[in-house]
Structures are given as structure tokens and as C-alpha cells.
Amino acid sequence: MAMARASQRIVASQITIGTEPGGSPVHFDIEELLATRLLVQGNSGSGKSHLLRRLLEESAGMVQQVVIDPEGDFVTLADVFDHVVIDGAAYSPPEIEALARRCREHRASVVLALEGLEVEQQIRCAAQFINALFDAPREFWFPALVVVDEAQMFAPSVAGEIGEDTRRMTLSAMTNLMCRGRKRGLAGIVATQRLAKLAKNVAAEASNFLMGRTFLDIDMQRAADLLGMERRQAERIRDLERGHFLALGPAISRRPVAVKIGPVQTGHKARADGLMPLPDAPREGMEALLTQRLADEVRVQAPPPPPPPAPRPADLVPASAPARNAAPVDTGERTEKLERMIVALAREEGATFQQASQLYQTFMMRCRAEGVGGVPMDMAMFRRRFAVASAGLERLDDDVRERVLALAEGVDDDVVAPYLAIAAAAAEGYPAPDEDELARVYGTSSPGRIRRLLEHLERLGLIVVREEFGGGRTISVPALDGVPAE
């Protein structure tokens, strides 16, 4: 009876990916895939997208699926299945991370469509999404397939045209997915046109392989090595037909097997494969279609007049100017009023999780409601003062507060609030803020981001973190003469 139940469980986790040359079905064990990951390789036109679509369609009812889609090829999955399409161009970076966390919490199958972004923006958006999947709380570590198409973009073997910080971010995200994702329930499936362009530490973590047609010797040799084939057998990879792959791995077969991928239910958004009749129009008519009203289409609109120069801070006065014989405006009282408004805004629940532009608009509306006219401060100054207010320094004595503020003069605006919170605690001799408080000040709900924040501050030399064997952690601020915050 136990053997029968085990057999049923194994069969229930299998899908049919295609057929062997003799017509026998080739099965794919999804449960085994969750533990062993998959690498797909093939030149453009070899049928990679068709293979991935077959795999996703057949397993859609078994496991949560997350598709990183740089070309918009997989959005049509939503037409037949329950996938939710997320347009990466429509959301801010914090929103992308929040969406990823909600995907893990609610086990939603999604397609992250990135075709509306430039290449570097695609890479950063995908990296943030994958990092947020990886950093999700433990209670949301449900099994999920994470499919990354065109993986050579997101895990390049060498530096390309993207910035070095972007390259480090995306390599870290892809390495986490393929190397450490299994314990978090994430099974990486990466597809690439060129094995030689894919980072080796990402490719090496896959135990299952589906190799399609490729022509370059270096890619054929790497594919043959992964399949356990001799170098002289690598020519076989060059002769594969479209939609035909060589498969190997614990989730497919213990020996290399040729497979023809089966049919799919959904398709590309738009297809232009094969030949189609040319338009039946005479040359003169076609010429007219190309040249008619061409000047109107490319006419450059006159640029709008430049905006007036921003007023200098010294010239700023309230919009309701006092009468000629009225007393002059008390600038000290006005400054205190602005400071109280910023502190009140920073204390509101969820304020630190909002975007700086939204907070600035709220601040300006409250200024007008309070009769503070003009432009009290620009957005950069507001962002800095809001960060200081978020750290809760008003509890400090004046001399201590000035000392702590002096430490933060060279600290970037995006990390100054948590640094000030740590420095204030150290200056008072109190324990360092816990991760929940740092997350509130920093405006995040991801424990992973807090860990990376502390690592970043330590690399900058602003703090020193000492981890204890018992699980405790001591944070000291060197600029405060080594006074620790535990």
C-alpha cells in the first residue's frame, strides 16, 4: 500500500514535455525539478521559448510560477491560465519589491513583463524582484518555479555596457536564486542563447539540462561537457532541428535523451514567422504612402519657454505679504513651524514607506494650509530634514544632537536616517535599534535589506558590526570614540 501511494505521488508530479524519436513520451518530474534546477540553451530560433511555454503550461496546476520576461513573450499565459501580468514599467522600485513579497505570500503565478524598459532598467527591475522573492519571510517559503528567459542578460559572464553596480546587483540576485534558492522553495529555470555569455557559477548550479541547436564551437563544447558527451559528439548539437533538444538530469533522464517538444496552448503576442504575401500596390502608390505629408510628421514643435529661475532661499517670503506698516516676519518662528510640520509628518504611521516625491507634495500642501507661502525648501533639503526627523533625534540634548548630526554630514540621504538612529542610541549608551525599528526608519519590510544596509554602512566605515555566537549583535560607531550600541 505504501509503495502504491509513493507511485501515485511520483506520477502526480510528472508532466510530459515531449516525445523521443520513437514516439515514447518523455516525462519531466516537477517535484524533482524543485530540488535540482534547470538550464536551457539554444540559439535564436531553436525553440527555447516554445520549450519554456510547454513546461509552464503543463505544470501550471501543480506549482506557483514566476516568469521574468524581458521580451513580453509569455504574457499570453494569462489568456488561458491564472497568471497575473506585472508591467515592470508601471511601478517604482519599492512597489516592485512589495509586489514580489505579495507574490510569495499569496502564491500567485505572475509574469514580470519588462519589454517597456531600457536594458539596464530591465536588469535592475528583475534583480530587485528576484531579491525580494529571496528575502521573503520564512512563513512564505512556498515552492515556486522562477523562469528567467534571456538569462545571459541577467547573469553576464563578463562586464558589458551596463554599469558595474547594476552588474553586481543582478549577479547577486541570480546567484542567490540558483545557489541558495532551494531552501526557500525557489527553483531557478534559466534559458540562454549563449552558454559562453552566462556566468559559470549560475550555470553550474543546474542539474537538469535541455540543449537545443547551437552553432558556435565554444557553446557546443560547453553543452557537450554538461551533457557528459565526448567532444567529437558535440557536432550532434549543431544538427538538431527546431523544437528538438537533448535532455539530461534527475528530473528528466539519467542518460542523454533526444526529445521533440510537444504542442502548446498559448502563443506569442505577435508572430512573424515564415513568408507572407507582399502588399499588392503599384510603385507610385507605395511611394506616395512613404512620402505623403512626411514634413508634417517630423515637424519639430517649438520648445516651451524655460521655467523661471528658482528663488533663492534668502528671497523666500510668505505668499500673504504683510502690510507696509506691519511687523516683519519672524523667520525664527517660521523655521520652527516648518520643523514641527516635518517632525509630525515623519511620525505618521507608514510615512517612511512613501516615496520622497509624495511626501514632499504632502508637505507643500500642509505649508499652504498653514499659511506658509512660497517655496519653504527644495525637495533635496526636505528629503534630508525628513530623514533626520525620522531618526527621532528630538529626544537628545542639544549638545548630543549637534554632535550626532555632525557625524552625518557626509552620509548619503538614502541611508542617513538609520545611521542617525544607530548613532543616537550609541551616543546615549542605549542598545542599538532592533531590525523592526531600523526597517521602519529605512522604509522597508525586508529583513534582507536591513542586513545589506548594515553591511553597506560597515563598508563605508560608519559602523562596526560584531556578530556573537549566541545570536546577539553589537554595533559600534567609531566616530563616537568606540561607544558601542548593543
Image (spheres, grey):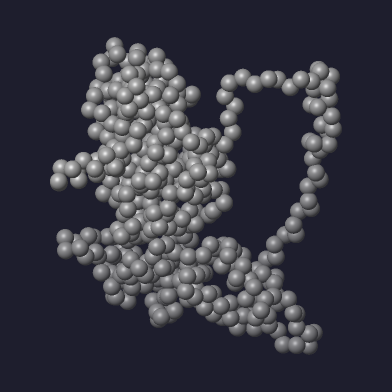
Tally the numbered discs. Answer: 0
Q: Position of residue 299 (x, y in %)?
A: 81, 38
Q: Is residue 460 visible to the viewer in this orientation of the structure?
A: no
Task: Name the residue furthest top.
Answer: 232
Q: Residue 224's quadrant in the figure?
A: top left
Q: Is residue 303 visible to the viewer in this orientation of the structure?
A: yes
Q: Is residue 366 above or below residue 116?
A: below
Q: Residue 221's quadrant in the figure?
A: top left
Q: Is residue 50 above or below residue 451?
A: above
Pick the front one: 97 or 236: 236
Q: Residue 277's quadrant in the figure?
A: top right
Pick the front one: 184 or 8: 8
Q: Residue at x 53, y 54 (%)?
A: 92
Q: Is residue 245 above or below residue 126?
A: above
Q: Residue at x 32, y 15 (%)?
A: 234
Q: Position of residue 295 (x, y in %)?
A: 83, 33
Q: Position of residue 334 (x, y in %)?
A: 62, 80
Pick the front one: 133 or 464: 133
Q: Residue at x 67, y 76 (%)?
A: 368
In this picture, residue 445 sits left or right of residue 287: left
In this picture, residue 322 sits left or right of residue 54: right
Q: Position of residue 446 (x, y in %)?
A: 38, 59
Task: Name the residue furthest front.
Answer: 1
Q: Residue at x 25, y 69 (%)?
A: 486
Q: Is residue 72 above or below residue 341?
A: above
